Structure formats: C-alpha cells, structure tokens
Image (cartoon, helix red, strand yellow):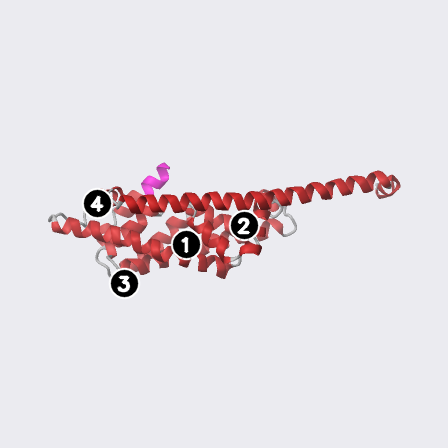
Amino acid sequence: VLLNVHALTWILSLVGYFRTKTPAACAVYVLTYMVAEICCVPLTPLEILTGFCFGFPFGILLDVLGRVSGAVISFLIARLLLRVGGDWQSQRCSCFSNIRSAAVLRGVGKAVQEQGLRFLVLFNLAYVPVAVKNYGLGFVPEVKLHLFVLAIFVIEVPMASLWAWIGSTAADDLAAAGLAANNATVAADAIGGGARHENPLIKVCLLAVGTLSVVLIYGTIHKKVSAELKLAHDENDISEALTKDDPESVRSEE
C-alpha cells in the first residue's frame, strides 16, 4: 500500500508536464500507465488523472491505450510463467509447476470454454483488482489473447469515458476558480474531490454491477470447480479400485 501511495504521488508530481499535451508527454503518460498497471498500482486515480491532464475526449484514447497495453503485457507475463513452469517441470520454477492443475483455474477454464467472451466480460466487470484480472486470466490456458483484449475493450471504453469526464470536469472547475491545475497538490485534491463528488447514482450503479458480477462469477466458478474436484475424486477412486483388484501389477511395477 505504501509503495502504491509513493507511486501515485510521483505520477502526480508530473501533472504539469502531462498537461502540456505534447506528443512526448502523451507517450510518457501511456508508458507510466502501463508500468503502473504491470506493477499492480490501483488504476482509478490514473483514469481520472487522464481526463484531468488531457481532457475529454482525448483522454479516453490515452486511457484505453495505456490500459490495454498494460493488460496485455501482464497477461503475457503470466502466460510465460505458466509455460516455463510446465516445461520439464523445472525445479527452479516449482512455484509455477502445479498451476495448471489448480482446481480454481481449471474451473475458470471450463467457464471460458462454455461461455467464451460473455464470461470474460463479466469477469472484467467484477469489482476486483485489475491485477487479479490480468495475471489471473493469463494463468488460464483456455483464455485466448484476442478474447481477453476484446473483453477489456467492451468494458474499458465506457469506463474510460466516465473517468475521463470526471477528471476533465475537475480541471474545468479549477480553471473556473482561477486555481493552477499544474500544481501537484491542487491536482491531487481536485481529482480526489472529483471522485468523492461523483454522481451518487453512478456510484451505486457501478457498485451494484461490480458486486453482481462478483456473485455471478463466484457461482459459475464454484460450480465448475466442484465438478473438477468431483471428477478428480472419482478418478482417484477408480485408481484405488483397480489397485485393489490387481495387486500383482503394483508389485511388478515396484
């Protein structure tokens, strides 16, 4: 948490530079956004900051670009770790060698196989940290990269529009009050105030949708995981029964 605070404070210290809106400032902002997402820094303040620095609707483009790029890199890192952990089951990567067999991930994989994009969209709607979505889905072999990216686009474009509008409105309010939006402290207060004074109806709707998504996802995954555990239990019972029926084969193998 302390590292996240320091990271966000450092990013806010560059608000004056970002508000120049030069090509270099845009590139640095997108790169910063990507690194923050890869490092599991909370993204909501950054999404509001995008609108605050770059306005509406241009902020939407930068937000989506940074969000998708960071998500893809995080996804590919998880996929690489999954592949390395599975290759030869290397002892050096023993912490990843059993990921494929994890019941929860197998349950998610079954849900993705059966529901495809619909499940991934629902997963992205869930009120859980972005890092859990990016890295978690990367560890599920059944999740294809193009579906992962498409699901993010479906959710991120409207969400980026909302946060960019809130940030842009906060910047306009500062300008109307004659305050310097390039000051990091003023910008932090304005962004925090914009998030706090967001339309209560929007907050309720977002919370309701996120909570409902979590409940639906939990129910789906629980069902699939239960099925996977039952299957593993049945296979174990069959194996034990065969061993009892043919003890000589066990001795010969030994």
Left or right: where 169 falls relative to 254:
left
Name the front one of labels 3 and 2: 2
Picture residue at 45% right of the left edge, 46% below the top = 213
Which residue is label 2 attached to? 139
Q: Position of residue 28 (x, y in %)?
A: 31, 56
Magenta-tinted stretch: 1-7
State the SS at label 3: helix
* Res 61 visible: yes
Report the front residue among 139 and 112.
112
* Res 40 visible: no
Report the front residue among 10 and 152.
152
Which residue is label 4 attached to? 190
State the SS at label 1: helix
Magenta includes 141? Answer: no
Alpha carbon distance from label 2 to label 4: 38 Å
Tell me if label 2 and label 1 are in contact, CB under 8 Å. no
Q: Which mark is residue 23?
A: 3
Picture residue at 30% right of the left edge, 51% below the top = 163
Q: Position of residue 156 (x, y in %)?
A: 38, 55
Q: Position of residue 254 (x, y in %)?
A: 84, 40
Query: Is 65 rendered above or below residue 252?
Result: below
Identify residue type, mark 4: Ala
Left or right: where 183 falls relative to 7:
left
Name the front one of labels 4 and 1: 4
Identify residue type, mark 3: Pro
Name the front one of labels 4 and 3: 4
State the SS at label 2: loop
Magenta includes 4? Answer: yes
Which residue is label 1 attached to? 70
Residue at the farthest left position = 178
Identify residue type, mark 2: Phe
